[in-house]
Image: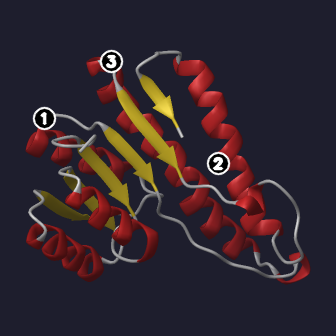
Amino acid sequence: MRVQDKVMLITGAGTGIGKETAHLFAKEGAKLILTDVNIDGVKETEKEVNKLGAEAISIKHDVSKEADWQEVVKKGVDQFGTIDVLFNNAGIYIIKPITEIELETWNKLMNINVTGTFLGMKHVLPVMQKQKSGSIINASSVAGLGGAPGHALYGASKGAVRIMSKDVAMEVKLPRIRFV
């Protein structure tokens, strides 16, 4: 029960990895701030983790919007007093040959996958720095490590998340704040 009573913010908690992570940490005794643009999905996740005994709140959240991040952090801290873990999980997966990627598609994916991760760290780190502890988990992918056909867009976003995570970890330099 290493996360017993720890407050965990999970983006993209309405489906997939985010939803499964919420279930796992609920069983381990964490308190959960669950966010997603899919409000119905994240409310369903909240109901499911409540049945597992977790204390949780769900918030509609577009990770690419700074005002949404400010609201999520405020609501989370107001509800639970702190944020111990940030799981920057929200993301989209688009695979296309580079010649078929529209600029609008490029910007949308980068705004969610990269800007969303940046904004999460920007707004949650001050809470962790104040308490001098915390963990930040930024979802990347093997697609960010090496090339693959059709992955120029997605791979670029996950490579950016990987390097940004390393850069911020070196910048923060607090021994009790870790990046995964």
**Which residue lies at the image location 26% right of the left edge and 73% below the top edge?**
42
Q: Is residue 114 left or right of residue 147?
A: left
According to the picture, the residue beneath numbered tag 1 turns out to be: 81
Q: Secondary structure at mark 1?
A: loop
Quarter of the image for residue 108 reads: bottom right
Residue at 80% across, 78% down: 101
The quadrant in which residue 37 appears is bottom left
- Whichever of callouts 2 and 1 sits on the residue coming sooner in the sequence is 1
Check whether the beta carbons of the residues at disc 3 and disc 2 lie within 8 A of each other: no
* Label 3 packing within 10 angstroms: few (<14), some (14-19), many (20+): some
Question: Residue 64 appears at what percent x and percent y?
Answer: 48, 58
Q: Which residue is mark 2?
A: 161
Q: Amino acid at mark 2?
A: Val
Give the amino acid at mark 1: Gly
Dot 3 or dot 2, earlier in sequence: 3
Spatial CA distance of label 3 from label 2 is: 23 Å
Circle 1 packing at 10 Å, graded few (<14), some (14-19), many (20+), is few
Q: Which mark is residue 132?
A: 3
Q: CA distance from mark 2 to mark 1?
A: 28 Å
Q: Is residue 48 left or right of residue 152?
A: left
